[in-house]
């Protein structure tokens, strides 16, 4: 019997209750991943005032600092996950980024905060690749897109909780206290992961693990699969749009719709940042969760008939995301703009289930975590690293002639047009995904 077949056959069956518990705990960890990553967006203006920063520095704090080592660390961590204990990696990663998030509250200047955010990025690099690989091992292919879609719900939920809690807490305990509070829950989740989950492919009595191919062979194989290349570029460009817009959404509302937001907050006894945080959380979570759920269900249903649906759905979502952001940042009323955030979040999150399924399927069983880490490397470098930084730089460049408010609006709108390129990449992926998946199946049958 082949090594891959032995590994599959020897895995001890798990109960439905344990599988559900694993999904809940890993999704909670992923939610904290996004909470700690995104909470700084709603704190941007207080941080800017306190530390005397320019918009490009805000962009560096919200994007480049995080992506700097996140993208570099993700690949070696994923390689370790493909041959080591994925549960231990996830648990230690949660503890690490949570402590770095709390430490950000003690930063005295831009450089200190930048370096601590780099630490957050390194820790968070150990979450998604091993977690998705672990989930994929616990679900058959026919249910995998739905399961990965549930896991991906952690992103909009975590980001939304971060925005809401951040906006409300900063009014009372300042941005420093808010960051300390944001890091605390991760200590509990990290310990629960370490103490209550088991990796079926790790430990002395574990199922035999399929041999791991050399990194160079994996990278060359993935590079030859045109669908994998285009899906990776597509999600990176979509992330450029999302991260660029979200990094400055709080600043945009204060600068452009400040009076509307203040009046709305006065009616409910909440400060402007509280209104912005809760509004973005409410509409973002609603739209993001709906998009993730529907995208995953459509991916399972339509993908069973035609595997190209796993890239057609992200293609449509990317194009519609660009349109939704264009409307969100141009409507005259602040409340209407916040409501349109639901549409933008819905379309952007359609990618999560089918897109992740495409990545996992195109990678093959023996390189799932490595492939996802490679995707995260490109997403982090191009989307998270450059998106907020370039939006901030354009805003600074436009500000002398247009003012800070309109300069920021124009910068965000220009960034949103990249969503069209993301849609094109996914369309190009649809032209070769069937042949690429057939090649993956043939290789795994031969490698055995």
Image: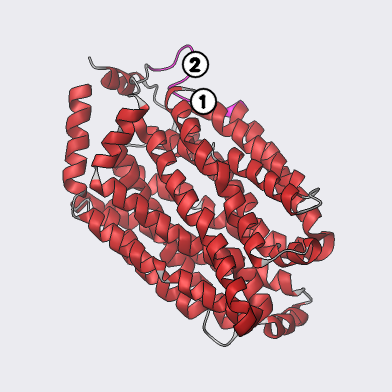
Q: Give residue 194's position: percent from left, percent from top.
A: 60, 28
Colour mode of the rendering: secondary structure
Q: Nearer the viewer, residue 380 or 398?
A: 398
Task: Inspect this view and state whether residue 251 appears.
Answer: yes
What residue is rendered at 43% in x and 16% in y? Answer: 206
Q: Which residue is mark 2?
A: 203
Q: Hey, which quadrant is residue 134 in on the image? A: top left
Q: Are marks 1 and 2 in contact (CB under 8 Å)?
A: yes
**In the shown orientation, is residue 291 left or right of residue 41?**
left
- In this rendering, is residue 165 above or below 266? above
Q: Hey, which quadrant is residue 6 in on the image? A: top left
Q: Give residue 294's position: percent from left, percent from top.
A: 38, 60
Q: Which residue is mark 1?
A: 198
Give the class, few, some or many, for how many residues have Cα within 10 Å of label 2's Cα (few <14, many ≥20).
few
Give the class, few, some or many, for how many residues have Cα within 10 Å of label 1's Cα (few <14, many ≥20).
some
**In the shown orientation, is residue 256 left or right of residue 197?**
right
Q: Quadrant of the N terminus?
A: top left
Q: Give residue 416's position: percent from left, percent from top.
A: 45, 70
- In this rendering, is residue 44 above or below 310? below
Task: Inspect this view and state whether residue 334 appears.
Answer: no
Q: Nearer the viewer, residue 262 or 245?
A: 245
């Amino acid at each position: 019997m082949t090594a891959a077949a032995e590994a599959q056959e020897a895995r001890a069956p798990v109960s439905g209750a344990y599988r559900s518990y694993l999904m809940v705990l890993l999704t909670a960890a992923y939610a904290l991943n996004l909470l700690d990553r995104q909470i700084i967006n709603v704190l941007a203006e207080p941080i800017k005032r306190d530390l005397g920063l320019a918009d490009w520095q805000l962009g560096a704090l919200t994007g480049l600092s995080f992506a700097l080592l996140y993208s570099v660390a993700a690949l070696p961590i994923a390689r370790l996950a493909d041959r080591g204990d994925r549960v231990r990696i996830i648990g230690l990663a949660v503890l690490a980024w949570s402590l770095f998030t709390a430490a950000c509250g003690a930063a005295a200047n831009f450089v200190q905060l930048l370096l601590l955010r780099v630490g957050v990025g390194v820790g968070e690099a150990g979450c998604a690749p091993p977690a998705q690989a672990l989930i994929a091992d616990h679900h058959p292919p026919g249910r995998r897109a739905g399961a990965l879609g549930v896991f991906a719900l952690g992103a909009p939920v975590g980001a939304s909780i971060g925005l809401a809690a951040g906006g409300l807490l900063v009014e009372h305990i300042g941005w420093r206290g808010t960051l300390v509070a944001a890091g605390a829950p991760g200590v509990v989740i990290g310990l629960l992961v370490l103490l209550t989950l088991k990796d079926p492919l790790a430990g002395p009595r574990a199922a035999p693990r399929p041999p791991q191919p050399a990194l160079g062979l994996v990278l060359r194989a993935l590079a030859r699969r045109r669908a994998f290349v285009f899906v990776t570029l597509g999600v990176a460009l979509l992330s450029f749009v999302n991260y660029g817009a979200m990094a400055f959404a709080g600043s945009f509302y204060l600068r452009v719709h400040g009076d509307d937001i203040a009046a709305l907050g006065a009616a409910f006894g909440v400060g402007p940042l509280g209104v912005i945080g809760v509004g973005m959380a409410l509409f973002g979570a609603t739209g993001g969760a709906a998009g993730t759920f529907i995208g995953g269900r459509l991916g399972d249903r339509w993908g069973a008939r035609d595997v190209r649906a796993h890239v057609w759905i992200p293609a449509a979502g990317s194009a519609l995301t660009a349109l939704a952001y264009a409307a969100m940042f141009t409507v005259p009323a602040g409340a209407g703009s916040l409501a349109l955030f639901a549409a933008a979040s819905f379309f952007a999150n359609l990618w999560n289930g089918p897109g992740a399924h495409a990545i996992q399927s195109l990678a093959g069983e023996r390189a799932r975590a490595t492939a996802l880490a490679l995707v995260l490397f490109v997403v982090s470098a191009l989307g998270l690293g450059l998106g907020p930084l370039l939006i901030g730089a354009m805003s600074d460049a436009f500000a002398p002639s247009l003012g800070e408010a309109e300069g920021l609006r124009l910068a965000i709108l220009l960034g949103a047009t990249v969503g069209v390129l993301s849609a094109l990449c996914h369309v190009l992926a649809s032209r070769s995904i069937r042949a690429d998946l057939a090649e993956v199946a043939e290789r795994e049958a031969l490698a055995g």
